[in-house]
Amino acid sequence: MNRYAQLFYILFFLLIMGAFASMAQNSYGLTILGIVGITFAITFLWRGIVMLRKKGAKNFYAIAELFSLSIISVLLSLRVFYIRIQGLEILLIVAALVLITVYLRKMIILGKAILPQQPKFALPVVLFYGSLILFLFSLVLMPVHQPSGELIGAIAFALLFIDILYCTFSSKGILNGKTESSFSIIFKLKDHSLLITSIFFLFSLYLGLNRMGILPGLYSDEYPQAYFELVEKSATGTEKPENGVYPYQQFKKSYDAFVTRNNIGKK
């Protein structure tokens, strides 16, 4: 991941900048978020292809991680642009379940390796991967049952917060002959867990502050807010299609006809 670290830092910065631009009611904010998501997807896909060509199936779990991250990045980017395609939610769930398997395996392996040498370092690693697994599990549950997904996401956020506190106040120790801290061990993880967890953490923090009324929602001027609310209800299963047509699709059709009929937004 080190070779791509600079690119990931830039994308992470653009992600935050796009979110703030959108909250400030600049419509280009969502465009930035979508482009960042697509760029993440292309980067993960390219790395997965390169690794597959060089090492074949020898590094199966690392390749599975990259391809799954690419799929999730694409699907979340489509959500940013309010593009909904039936059946893709299943692909999102499958990719998230693959990542859960990858990170659960990594957590067990690292936990077993660290525990005999330095038990106090095993806990932050387990808490870190545990929170990431719960974040991914909440992603799986959201299309199926939103309240459960939000609850699991809140638990994951709390678990990660506890881990940060533990790492902050824990003392240093010797691991594999080197002086380490809890933070240094997590920062040295050779997968994309730190990047993904950071994004989940910020997203969960934003949702919490938005629910409390401290931060505004993300803004788009393409359609009225009622349209986006219907899209979210359809995505979470609250709204069901009638004769194969979702309420948001009917709303969009009527709104587009209204705009065309009244020549709105056209010179």
Image: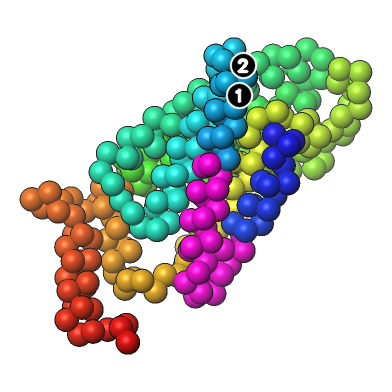
Magenta span: 16-42
Q: Secondary structure at mark 1?
A: helix
Q: Nearer the viewer, residue 151 or 46?
A: 46
Residue 36 within the magenta-colored segment of the rendering: yes
Can I make out residue 192 in this image?
Answer: yes
| Total residue callouts | 2
Q: Residues within 10 Å of mark 2 (few under 14, many from 20)?
A: few
Q: Amino acid at mark 1?
A: Met
How far from the left and from the top, in percent, is residue 263?
23, 84
Q: Which residue is mark 2?
A: 55
**Disc on res. 51:** 1
Residue under the point 20% across and 85% down: 262
How far from the left and from the top, in percent, is residue 102?
54, 23
Residue 120 lies, with reference to residue 131, above or below; the image says above
- Residue 219 position by quadrant: bottom left
Q: Nearer the viewer, residue 204 or 224?
A: 224
Residue 92 lies, with reference to residue 98, above or below; the image says below
Residue 111 lies, with reference to residue 164, above or below; the image says above
Q: Main secondary structure of the magenta part?
A: helix
Q: Amino acid at mark 2?
A: Lys
